[in-house]
Amino acid sequence: MPKLVILLVVILLIVSSLFIFLGLKSRQTKNNPEKTEREEIMKVTSPVFTQEEQMPEDYTCDGENVNPPLNIVNLPAGTQSLAIIVDDPDSPAGNFTHWLVWNINPQTKEIMEDSVPENAVVGTNDFKKMEYDGPCPPSGTHRYVFKVLALGTKLELGEGATREELDEAMDEHVLDSAELIGLYSHKESPK
């Protein structure tokens, strides 16, 4: 009988020690600012429109046709550069690219209105221009996807590259991405 009691006490001590150890370990992880897991997911937002809401006219072909301001937060560790792709998945011809920018400094938290970040590289959009061309759907309401990609490298890709070339260069380097979708309906011409 005493051997059984001793065995039970030893087991109880081992189990108790394990719970205490795991509890301390859990508390250390919660208080450690250098955790390996991010608490928040990568996000892109804009102060001028929200997810799946109508975009202001200034950022379209009916207005100033300039890029909207974007805010980028919660990049993954190891991000060496950012890329932005803006496209219209509702285009009658299929996915239509409006803006390509890459090698954006990962310290960039805000893309200003009507600007390209310093030292970033601009590609050729589907209008065959190296600039932002805003929403201008032929009919109906289209979605415009502002996709920001966190890359584990700076791309060796020159100015004027196409969407296909950018996609190929980014292959296997994307650490994370975030999307902001704006909606726009083109103004009707007066009759």
Image (cartoon, rainbow, N blue to C red):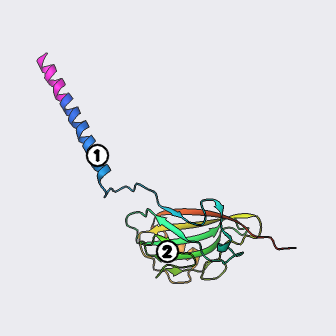
Q: Which mark is residue 98?
A: none
Side of 176 relative to 33 (left or right): right
User: Earlier along the polypeptide chain: callout 2 or callout 1?
Assistant: 1
Is 154 situated left or right of 90 in this image? left
Residue 169 location, x and y as percent?
49, 74
Q: Magenta stretch mostly in which secondary structure?
A: helix
Q: CA distance from mark 2 to mark 1?
A: 42 Å
Looking at numbered disc 2 in the image, what kind of residue is underneath it?
Ala
x and y, in percent, of residue 89 in the image: 66, 65
Which mark's residue is nearer the viewer, 2 or 1?
1
Magenta-highlighted residues: 1-11
Circle 1 residue: 27
Give the position of the C terminus as an image quadrant. Answer: bottom right
Of 76 and 175, which appears nearest the observer? 76
Q: Which residue is mark 2?
A: 169
Which residue is painted at 26% across and 46% down in the image?
25
